[in-house]
Image (tube, rainbow, N blue to C red):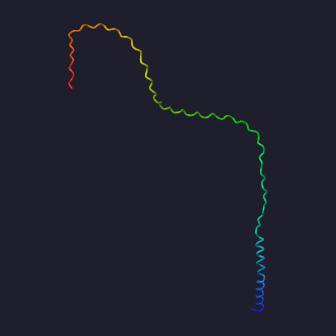
Amino acid sequence: MSVHGSFSSIHMKGIIMKLSPLFVVLVTVLGLSACDKPTVVNVPAEKESVPGPAGPPGATGGQGATGNTGDTGATGGQGATGNTGDTGDTGATGGTGATGDTGKTGGDTIIVVPPPAAE
């Protein structure tokens, strides 16, 4: 190697070392300036709507259809037995019966009466 060659390599190292912080700053500035900046959009607030006056009433609706007829109900159970009626009044006394014929004169009929049983 020649003297001239070694001087120039030392000289180049010095220049690179002096310019290194400048390159770092330059790369940082370029990197940050390349970033997207968000766009701020101000949206105006919506106005609150106020209802207007009521409109006229609508026409009357038609008559609805007739409903279905219900089913016939079930037959009811047998009712309870009624109360016993009051006892009737005593009947009127009957009329006098017809008078019988006169009896025949007795014959030889004997009536035997047994003695009472011993105790």
In percent of width and height, residue 87 lies at 43, 22
Camera-side residue: 67 or 55? 55
Q: Residue at x 77, y 90 (%)?
A: 7
Looking at this rendering, what residue extends furthest in the front direction?
119
Left or right: residue 39 versus residue 80 is right
Up-down relation of residue 33 to residue 12 (above or below): above
Name the quadrant containing residue 15: bottom right
Left or right: residue 111 versus residue 1 is left
In percent of width and height, residue 85 lies at 45, 24
Q: Residue at x 76, y 65 (%)?
A: 38
For the N terminus, the quadrant is bottom right
Name the quadrant containing residue 31: bottom right
For the C terminus, the quadrant is top left
Camera-side residue: 80 or 46? 80
Camera-side residue: 7 or 5? 7
In percent of width and height, residue 90 lies at 42, 18
Left or right: residue 91 versus residue 2 is left
In percent of width and height, residue 102 lies at 29, 7
Q: Residue at x 76, y 84 (%)?
A: 17
Name the quadrant containing residue 68: top right
Up-down relation of residue 116 to residue 14 (above or below): above
Left or right: residue 99 versus residue 59 is left
Q: How many marks?
A: 0
Q: Residue at x 78, y 43 (%)?
A: 53
